Image: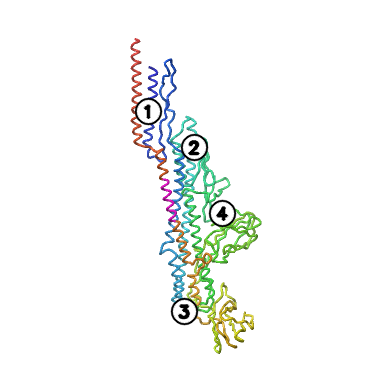
Amino acid sequence: MAGLLGIGITGLQAAQLGLSTASHNIVNAATPGYSRQEVVQATLPPQATGNGFIGQGTAVETIRRQFDEFLNREVVIGESQSAALAAFHAQITRVDDLLADPNAGLAPALQSFFNGLHDVANEPGSVVARSALVSAGEGLVSRFRLIDQRLSELRASVNGEIVSTVAGINTFAAEIARLNERIVVAESAVEQPANDLRDRRDQLVLELNRLVGASVTQQGGAYNVFVGNGVPVVIGAQSFALGTLASPTDPGRTVVGIVTPGGVTQIPDDSLQGGSLGGVIAFRGQSLDSTQNALGRIAIVLAGTVNEQHALGQDLAGALGGAFFGVAPASVAGSNGNTGNAQLAAAFTDYGALTTSDYRILYDGAAWTVTRLSDGAQQSFAALPATVDGVAISIASGAANANDQFLLRPTALGASGIAMAISDPARVAAAAPIRTAAGAANTGAATISAGAVNAPPPPDANLTQTVTITFTGPGTFNVTGVGTGNPAGVAYTPGAGITYNGWTMAIAGTPAAGDTFTVSANTGGVSDSRNALLLAALQSRGTIAGGTATFQSAYGQLVSRVGDDTRGAGIRADAQQAFLAQAQAARESYSGVNLDEEAANLVRYQQAYQAAARAIQVGSRLFDELLDLSR
């Protein structure tokens, strides 16, 4: 009877654990990260007798959670990549909306400015047209600055998101470390898996990966968690905090680092992939920087080329034209880790050669290496100054030590730094500063062109000095005038350019001996629009990217690129979401709670419990009857 009672008790205990486990599954069916648990039973060692081995009942070996490492890892990776793509798409959509807006974009302001130039070319003496041009220029400057301000606000938003995300990462890392300790202690005490604690830890790892891509290794019962290129944030029961700091070469750029006793050591941006942190960092590096640089390049090239042509003209007062726009300088900053005191300077030498890339400048103690960050192309120079992609780099002061590095951003400040250099409509240099004339007593059949001032500025100091060309015959001429050197017997080629004092003109036809032609100051040239026409022609001239793009087409390419990147990011985000849904469904089919199945388990374990109780009842009655017989 004792054996029958004992067997019944083991069955009763097993059924009770089964009921508890099924109930636990049911109430946690909606708990995030919960893995279905099941009772694992085994028979107790049988008792050997002369009649054979007699069973001694059952025992529950463990409560096992239905967890598959591979399926769970697929979900974790999917969550990390989905969060990164979603964050990237959300940010770049804001840039796309800003640039493509038909009213707030740059295209209408560019068109208005060049319309103003055409109007001045049509009516160079009109103060109304000149005032409208100055107003259009101010509007263009405001539009550049407004768009750049919005982009800068996005940059500040990215910085803030990085700071808040790092705080969230530290919270999750600390909680994972605490769970590591609890799991190790709990499992060592009973030598059974702490299922619920493990589920909670795996859910925290999943939530951590929504913030940043993390890799996990197991050491005993603990997780070691790493981000970036092996930077530890959890080792056993110890967590290591991440921090944020200003970039050593760009104070306005927040970067991520690992907190050490000596401060915060920067983690390279390109190693932080996955999660919302990886998404916003990728957006900043792949889209925001290049967009702001591309906009800045348009502003710099526009301001620079307009200024170059405007300086070759003459205003209503007869003075040579000065700068029409203020041009932002190239930005070059040394790392705060430099040991030398060198300060570098950068100046534009060729607007058409400017790119939209930033550059890293490294001094190794013997030579300078300039790396274009957009494609990794490098150029080395034994010494500075040196010119790279239309920018002259020089040492302004001090000296560099080995391993000193600098960040050159030629166009980053272009859109924010463009400004109007004139406000008086009379200062618009619509006229050319020179005029040409044929002598009234000429008897030959030669004619002289209107002439043009040679670029680049500044104009020649003797530009407006009177120069006279006197033909000594149909094939030669003499030149007189300040700055010319007064050459005699110059060979004449009909239609060929003749250049002195910073201007070029041409004489065509057959001159006669004694014929004279003059180039002199354009006194009273109020109705002259030659320089205004040249300024207006900049609209259709290839001035950007090596002469392959106009201002409008360069902006159109920028809008198109951002639009394509936005659509591509949306497609990738949707595709990744579909992949994540599949991974989640696969994990749920293995680890998720099926309420119908658990309801059936409740009935099964209830019946097992009742049957075990009946066995105990039978054993008890038989034992009582034996006692009665012995009385």
Say whether residue 354 is visible.
Answer: yes
The residue carrying pointer 2 sits among few (fewer than 14), some (14 to 19) or many (20 or more) residues within 10 Å by Cα, namely many
Badge nearest the viewer, 1 or 2: 1
**Three-letter amino acid code of the residue under disc 1:** Gln
Give, as a three-letter code, the residue at label 4. Pro
Q: Is 615 left, or right, of 529 in this rendering?
A: left
Return the disc, 4 or 3, that comes first in the chain's sequence. 3
Instruction: Give the spatial CA distance, label 1 vs label 2.
Output: 30 Å
Q: Position of residue 607 (x, y in %)?
A: 33, 27
**Mark carried by residue 125:** 3
Kind of element beneath mark 2: helix
Q: Nearer the viewer, mark 3 or mark 1?
A: 1
Q: Give the mark nearer the N terminus: 4 vs 1.
A: 1
Mark closer to the chain start, 1 or 2: 1
Residue 172: x, y in percent? 47, 43
**Which residue, given by chain and number where applicable, does mark 1 sit on?**
16
Please give the label number shown on residue 180: 2
Chain-order first, disc 2 or disc 4: 2
Q: Residues within 10 Å of mark 1 (few under 14, many from 20)?
A: some
* Foreground pick, 128 / 601: 601
Image location of residue 15, percent across then percent down: 37, 27
Assign a secondary structure to mark 3. loop
Q: Earlier in the sequence, mark 3 or mark 1?
A: 1
Question: Is label 4 in a helix, a strand or a loop?
Answer: loop
Q: Main secondary structure of the magenta part?
A: helix
Give the residue number, with chain letter if any, for mark 4: 248
Which quadrant is the N terminus positioned in? top left
